[in-house]
Structure formats: structure tokens, C-alpha cells
Image (tube, grey):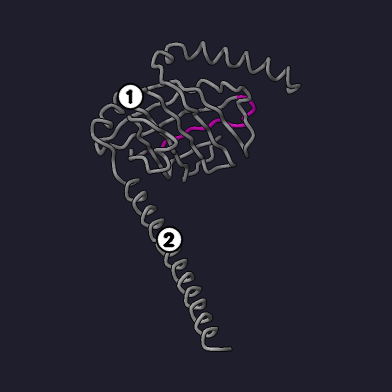
Amino acid sequence: MNRKQLWITKQVNYISKMKKLYFLFSLLMATVIGLSSCESDDSLTNEPPAQEYIDKAKEILVGDLVLSTRATMSGVDKTLLESGCPTKFNFSWREDGTMVLDMSDFTVGAMPFAITFRCATKFMQLNSWEKDEYPGSGWVKFVGTDGNVTTSGEEGSGARVDGFLNVDTKQVEFIVDYNMMNVRTETFLQEIDKSRIDRFEEEFAQYEKDLEEAKKEQGKA
């Protein structure tokens, strides 16, 4: 190999090394930025929303409310109807700003037992990916852990609530994972109508009627 070829080979090797170093540096920076973003989101998750949002939430989520809910057991929908089942929840507030979610003797469709549930929740800001999923203003989220559950005399704990509320549009949705027999309830996105509490018995009776019809159509009667 002559001197010129040797020089070219050295230059190629040098460029190759620099490319590898640049790639490694870019990868390292992407990792650092990603971790920083995650840490930022984690930090944001723990931050409460503006007080005006909390004040509005206290006016919206208070007392007995009727919301349409689906119940699943091991992923199987036990409410059977796409519209869900009218379900009575109670919302109350503690002096420390936490919201307590209660549900008593919930049983619908093909569920083999009734559920009584209680969990304290904390309101938080949305993180970056949640803001993409819930665009626009007015959104807050509420999270509760270690909720108490009672089913047919059996007691358990560790139930979890994950929910979102828009204090401007009064839309709400939340999922309760009862940490027991793979049971979950999904209160899908809907606008809160406080007058439904006055029609609860009527709505529930209609649900049971529609449920029997659906069972007949599906051959489950």
C-alpha cells in the first residue's frame, strides 16, 4: 500500500469512528431527554391543578350522581348492554382536598355478587401524553389507590381509581379496578346530568327490561 492509499484508509477509518461517536452521542442525548421528559411528567403528575379547577370540581362531583357504567369480569362485559347500566355513585370531599368515591351494593347483569366500594382520590394535573388524549382546557385527573372493597361478606383492599374530569364541559370518565376476581367498572366518557338521580329507579327498571330482551336475542335467557 502506497502513501496515498494509506492516507485515504486512515481518513475513512477516522470518518467511520466519528460517525459511530456521533451516533452514540445522539443516542445518549435522546435517552437523557427521554428520561428528563419522564421525570418532568412524573413531577407534573404529582402537582395539583389550579385551585379554580378544584373549586369547580367540588361543585360538579358532589353528593349522589347517576352515571352509566359497564362492569367487566376477566374482560367479559357483565352489563351486556352497550349503553351500560345506570349506577349510583356518591362523591364527598375532605378538608385536605381529597375526594371520596363511594358505591354501594353494585350488581348488574350476570354479575354473581354485589360490590360495595370506597376510595379517597387526589386531583392532579395531566401529563404530556394525557394532554394529547384529552385536548383542550378544563381537564384534571383524579387517582385513588388502596380503596376498600366488600363483596358478599368478603373484604379486600388495593382497589384503584383512575379518572378524568373536564370542569368546563362537566364530562367525566373513570375506571375502578377492584383488585378482586379481575372485576373492573368503566364509567365511560359522558356529561354529568344531576337530574338523573331523580330518575334512577325508572332508569334502572328500564335497564333491566332491556337486559332481558338482550339476553333473549343473544340466547342467554
Q: Position of residue 23 (x, y in %)?
A: 47, 66
Residue under pointer 2: 31
Q: Position of residue 12 (x, y in %)?
A: 51, 76
Q: Is residue 30 left or right of residue 185?
A: left
Label 2 packing within 10 angstroms: few (<14), some (14-19), many (20+)? few
Residue 197 on the magenta segment: no
Do tag 2 and tag 1 residues touch (Cβ < 8 Å)?
Answer: no
- Place residue 174 in its image quadrant: top left
Which residue appears at 40% of the width and 62% of the height?
A: 29
Tag in front: 2 or 1: 2
Q: Position of residue 178 (x, y in %)?
A: 51, 40
Which residue appears at 47% of the width and 77% of the height?
A: 14
Residue 118 on the magenta segment: yes
Q: What stretch is highlighted in magenta?
A: 109-120
Which one is nearer the viewer's eye here, 50 or 27?
A: 27
Q: In this view, does 168 lie to the left or right of 211?
A: left
Residue under pointer 1: 168
Circle 1 sits in a helix, a strand or a loop, which is it?
A: loop
Label 1 packing within 10 angstroms: few (<14), some (14-19), many (20+)? some
The three-letter amino acid code for the residue at tag 2 is Thr
Number of numbered tags placed on the structure image: 2
Q: Position of residue 169 (x, y in %)?
A: 36, 22
Query: Mark 2 to mark 1: distance in Å?
Result: 37 Å
- Place residue 138 in its image quadrant: top left
The three-letter amino acid code for the residue at tag 1 is Asp
Q: Is residue 167 left or right of residue 106?
A: left
Which residue appears at 41% of the width and 56% of the height?
A: 34
Query: In which quadrant will I find the N terminus?
Result: bottom right
Above-or-below relation of 61 to 124: above
Which one is nearer the viewer's eye here, 158 or 170?
A: 170
